[in-house]
Amino acid sequence: MKQKLFEDWNAYLDVAPSADPSDDVVRFHSRVLGRDVNIEPSLVHQPTGLRTAALCAGIKHEGTLDFSVVKLDAPGSAAAIFTKSLCPSYAVLAGRAALADGCAQVLAVISKNANVFTPTGEQDTRVMTGWLAEELGVAPGDVVPSCTGVIGIPLPMEKVRAAVTGLSAKLRPGGLDDIARAILTTDRGPKVCSVRVGDAVVCAMAKGAGMIEPNMATMLAYFFTNVDLDGAALREVLAEAAGRTFNSLTVDSDTSTSDTLAMFSTRAVPIAGDARADWVDAVRCLAIKLARDIVAQSEGATKLIDCTVKLDSSESDAKLTAKKIVNSPLVKTAVHGGDPNWGRIVMAIGKPDERLTLGAIDRGDVVIRMMGQVVFSKAQPISIDLPALARSIKSSTRVSIEVVIGEGRHAATVWGCDLSHRYVDINSDYMT
């Protein structure tokens, strides 16, 4: 059944019959084509005018793709949103500077080394960018670097230099599938999607499985398109899409030092009117697809949590309250174990947060639903078959929680996941 995700967005979700939420279909209704268009869970659609190379530089593990480059045939428009961490990576600082003019030609990504809090990190980033610019024949200011991985370990510059040397001869048209694999760290696999409407194409990829509660955009996510829009227009659409997608997901409440959400365009296809509206919807839907996949495939996750909060003060309050629920270790472990303990949801919505304008919550104003069933309503627990609800939560890979406070004039949806033993296993020896 087609589910409308947001009242004011042309975005719909079809829940797949499989147990994997990554199989769910995101779609929008095209004004140009007069029919629904599905987001493809692959990179079958890629804009022309891009060349790529993904290499095994020995940064991650020997024989594993870990250094990748995407080069536009000519300088194009570009925009990005970066982490608000107070300890940003040197790549983030360099990316902000490079994209200040809304233009770029090269994206370079290093995986398994975040280059954060390193003694020569700023210099190393500048040197690497210079090497890439010289090798690829572009202006240094048109190179956007990204780094992801372990914090505090200097970049192995001799390996980076070796990877850059002769790189221009290794570039080939397309090849974004290899880039999507090369950017991964603890991810289960690539997270990719794409769509074409007429001549307009947009595709996207993301990495991220832990250290995830974006406070801007997400982990690392890259969009590539061919529409003729400048950097300011790209950023406006990107930021608006991120608000309800990447900024509305959380795995473990931790904001990365390296979060980057970027879009690059070859500017080959004029776009206006209905075609531009379709393209905006496509970007939104690609963001929805990637955001849900990040949560569904996150470290140790066995269940995707879809949490909606409706209240009367503001949409911002609704999102903050929903995140309090999904970020609660007690809620996350209850969901993992199939425990319909709605008392933990009450605890979570009551936690103080100086960002909230919401005041004290009257229990007579609250309705709580789990898996669509009302478990608490207007000051009264509801008598239901709790063992049956527990079995439903335990057996499902998609768990829904809804809280309504008052009339619920403002709503926000946040996606999260359960907390399993596997998450602890992965993160207890990540460096070693």
Image (cartoon, grey):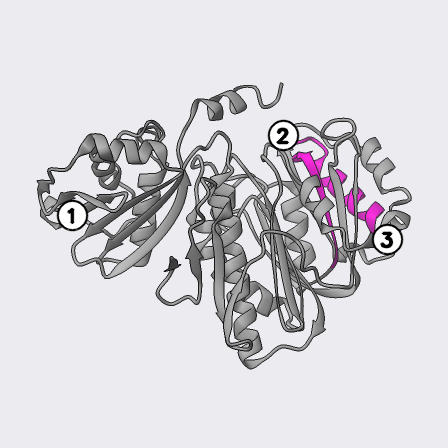
Location of the C terminus (image quadrant)? top right
* Location of mark 2 (residue): 150
What residue do we see at 54% from left, 71% from top?
278
> For the residue labelled by badge 1, is the local secondary structure a helix, a strand or a loop?
strand
Along the viewing direction, whichever of 244 and 278 lies nearer the viewer? 278
Along the viewing direction, whichever of 420 and 261 lies nearer the viewer? 420
Residue 287 coordinates in the image, percent (x, y): 52, 55
Q: Is residue 214 visible?
A: no
* Location of mark 1 (residue): 366
Would you say the residues marked 2 and 3 are in contact, meaning their CB atoms lie under 8 Å apart? no
| Location of residue 253 by image quarter | top left
Badge 1: how crowded within 10 Å, few (<14), some, or many (20+)? many
What residue do we see at 82% from left, 32% from top?
159
* Location of mark 3 (residue): 136
What residue do we see at 69% from left, 74% from top?
269
Q: Which of label 3 and label 1 is nearer to you?
A: 1
Disc 2 from disc 3: Cα separation? 28 Å
Disc 1 from disc 2: Cα separation? 43 Å
On screen, residue 381 versus residue 229, left or right, reads: left
Inspect the image, locate mark 2, and give the three-letter code of the amino acid beneath it.
Val
245 w.r.t. 155: above or below: below
Inspect the image, locate mark 1, and give the three-letter code of the amino acid beneath it.
Val
Magenta part of the chain: 105-133
N-terminal-most mark, 2 or 3: 3
Disc 3 from disc 1: Cα separation? 59 Å
What residue do we see at 78% from left, 63% from top?
49
Badge 3: how crowded within 10 Å, few (<14), some, or many (20+)? many
